[in-house]
Amino acid sequence: MLLTGGPLNSWWQQQVRSARREWGGGSTQGYYVFGADGNAVLGDNFIPRIPSLLDRGHQLWRQNPARPVGVSEQNIRNAQTAVAPPGTSIIRLFNRIRPVPPGASEMNAMLGRDYLWITADEVRELLSAGAGGQSFAMPRGVVARLAVFHLVDNIRGQVWPWQPQSVSRANFTARLVRANGGARMFSFSGDYAKRDSRPPQWNDRGQEGRVEGEFEVDVTTAKITRFRAIADSLAWSDATYDRNGAPPSGRYPLLTAMVEANDELAQRVAPEPAAQGGSFYLNVRLAR
């Protein structure tokens, strides 16, 4: 969805046509082999054939001479990833189905990962709201980002986007539990629910659960220095577009763990929903 719906769409579709002669439009999901000249050689999305994809791609590449890459300056500008605003706190997220229901595809035992951005202005809002010692509502931007983009089933790969209007409940509150010099420790919790339908891809998809955690803020820098949270939810989906789809047993347990991320990789990799445009990601708001 990043390439098919983003500013590199025309370049990507040209590559897909070269790599998958049978492609007639629609989804471009799959695995692709590119030559050193930057052109696609072969693509496939049928799991049993993936182990031989590189060998077949290498054979095809040897049969065809290198071609000009044809990457324009505009392509390069379009490919630049979104960058977090200065002072942003970055949280690493892990999603798992646990336990995996009997009869579910082995793909459901995989691990989903992403990053959450919390801006310095939102952290300052937390500090200001918590100064009185009473419980207060979490910044709506943070709540919306979690509910729409991050409390999701991305176990088997990239998730179909949720829309703000699909979220029927997302009420997160926090309170100051400890002040120690220039540090402030907060606890937070909340319930959320979302549901939507998109025939023919799916007729019913949803998730509802609860999140609880705590985080510590450095008052001087307005940055989160420690973050620990867990979201425990039930999810369901009758999607038909994935051979290795969600567990077929109705509602299944989905867990999301969150922890601070201060390493260099986390600073460089944008959240998946922000990669094609950080503005919508940072400014998303719930419809209710």
Image (tube, rainbow, N blue to C red):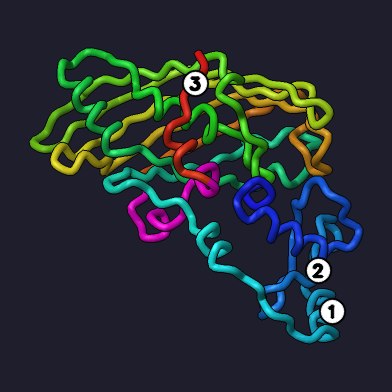
At label 1, counting other C-alpha atoms closer than 10 Å, the crowd grade (few under 14, some 14-19, many 20 or more) is some
Question: Going 75% across and 46% down the picture, which residue do you hit?
Answer: 106
Left or right placement of residue 147 versus residue 138 in this view: right
Q: Secondary structure at mark 2?
A: strand
At label 2, counting other C-alpha atoms closer than 10 Å, the crowd grade (few under 14, some 14-19, many 20 or more) is many
Q: Which residue is mark 3?
A: 286
Residue furthest out toward the left: 181
Mark number, residue 5:
none
Name which residue type carries label 1.
Leu
Residue 101: percent from left, percent from top = 73, 33
Instruction: Locate residue 221: give its quadrant.
Output: top left
Instruction: Locate residue 62: give its quadrant.
Output: bottom right
- Front-most of residues 3 and 195: 3
Residue furthest out toward the right: 22
Name which residue type carries label 2.
Leu
Mark number, residue 42:
2
Magenta-highlighted residues: 261-276
